[in-house]
Amino acid sequence: MRATALMAFASLGCAAAPALAQPAVLAPPGVSACSGCHVAPGAGVATTIPPIHGRDAAEIVAAMQEFRSGQRPATVMDRLSRGFSDDEVRAIAAWLSAQR
Amino acid sequence: MRVNRRTLLAGLAAAAAVPPLARGQDAARVVVVGGGFGGATCARALKAAGIGNVTLVEANPTYVSCPFSNAVIAGLREMEAQRFGYDRVRASGVGVVHAQATDIDAAARRVGLSDGTALPFDRLVLSPGIALRFDALPGYTEAAAEAMPHAWTAGAQTDLLRRQLDAMEDGGVVVMAVPANPYRCPPGPYERASLIAHYLKTRKPRSKLIVLDAKDAFSKQRLFQDAWAKLYPDHLEWVPLSGGGRVTDVDVSGRLLRTEFGEHKAHVANVIPPQRAAMVAQRAGVADRSGWCPIDPVTFESRLQPGIHVIGDAAITGAIPKSAFAANAEGKACAAAVAGLLRGESPPAPKLLNTCYSLVAPDYGISIAGVYRPNAAGLFADIEGAGGTSPLDAPPATRSLEARYAEDWFTTITTEVFA
């Protein structure tokens, strides 16, 4: 189950684009830390931690809600997702989805 | 332009706050001192945020990562995998100067360098890391560290401890001294103890590790102790403060570590001494009597020196641990705040994350995570209900997955910072 969810999450991938951090200036609070674990666009490496930049915003919101409620299996995302309100999650998802 | 800026500054010289730049951020000069996970991240993020002139000052041409250096000590990883250069940082548009910041003049807004030059700045970010306090543990001097390595700054010390373990005969006793809080990487000593125990169990099974601790409680304690009981019952003994664990002095020639309760003879001694913010923070006047640097958590600006920001292990960040993950997150948040200040804006309160993985064995990872925001007392505080450690009853597959994620985190963060 877990592996399937991960694969589905990972397979969406994201297109190559300029390297490293986008101007953190416009980023909503918290989101700039995501790229500590989730590879940012154009980094040129792949890991088993799924990329989240450039993903559909609704999908990110759904994933965060499922992490928070415990519906989606997780190692650390259950613990991290509980630190964000619905509004914050929506802002984070919108910003991430625009990073390509 | 510079004349205009100076004129403007002169007119506002008495103001406590640093005025925004009249000329805009394109021409702003930001100097970042310290090219580790915090500083290199911050320099690149400042450049990406549109700051025209970003200079990173770092004495060493090669960075040696502390994260994963415990695996090097235990023979599970090669030192080469810990080394990172600054070519890509330079290619991103950041000026990289390999020199020491010897003199920081907050009022004149300039950093004097060991090569005799000086860098003027509109804002300065210090990410200097730690200094080991060779005045804090009687007998433990810089010279003593050549016999009893601390290996708490990675590089030659990491190699030295690894070679000492390699050279030790089976049946030897390894003794670790662990300091009281605060220090760099709260779970680090316990990951190291785990991996040294793994080394002994698999390579020198008649040997033993004794961990002498100046604390009774530590990060991920139940997870570590649960794993130690299962994996290393014969190879790792942890002695807490209440059991006489606090090391009061060391005797290098006798290879002795003394506590209030007695003394321990070591074949290999790893002494992690108390720490404080690196020397440059003291020179800049941003460290307080605790030895660490108080900051405004919204902007990371020093509470002691306006115009100077402090991030990473050197800063007092409340509930946020002194970790590489946190330094990277702080570097990005600080860059956003500095760019905002240079545009004349008031930066919004940030939210920060931390995730720290520890390896208990090569295929056994555990983690602690947290989400933080500034509180009324002006410190970062945990957001209640969020964060915490891996579950105590997780199956082996989860431990294995977290070990994998630890590696993945290292790949990702070192790519973001140095590649």
Image (cartoon, coloured by chain):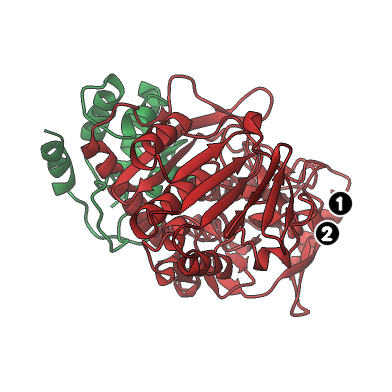
Q: Secondary structure at mark 2?
A: helix
Kindly identify which residue carries mark 2. Answer: B7
Q: Position of residue B178 (x, y in %)?
A: 61, 45
Q: Position of residue B170 (x, y in %)?
A: 44, 61
**Residue found 63% across the figure and 75% down from its top:** B98
Q: Amino acid at mark 2?
A: Thr
> Along the horizontal axis of the image, is B40 left or right of B33?
left
> Along the horizontal axis of the image, is B388 left or right of A4?
right
**Residue found 41% across the figure and 54% down from its top:** B206
Residue situated in front as seen by the camera: A19 or B166:
B166
Residue situated in front as seen by the camera: A1 or B154:
B154
Q: Amino acid at mark 1?
A: Gly
Q: Position of residue B187 (x, y in %)?
A: 51, 42
Residue situated in front as seen by the camera: B405 or B234:
B234
User: Which image quadrant is residue B414 in?
Assistant: bottom left
Please tell me whether residue B103 is drawn above or below residue B321 in the rendered image: below
Please tell me whether residue B355 is drawn above or below residue A83 in the rendered image: below
Q: Secondary structure at mark 1?
A: helix
What shade has chain B been given?
A: red
Marked residue chain, label 2: B
**Residue found 68% across the figure and 50% down from its top:** B257
Tags 2 and 1 touching, CB below 8 Å: yes
**Residue found 55% across the figure and 69% down from its top:** B160
Q: Quadrant of the N terminus of chain B?
A: bottom right
Q: Residue furthest bottom?
A: B115
Q: Quadrant of the C terminus of chain B?
A: bottom left
User: Which image quadrant is residue B270 in?
Assistant: bottom right
Q: Say which chain is green.
A: A
Q: CA distance from mark 2 to mark 1?
A: 6 Å
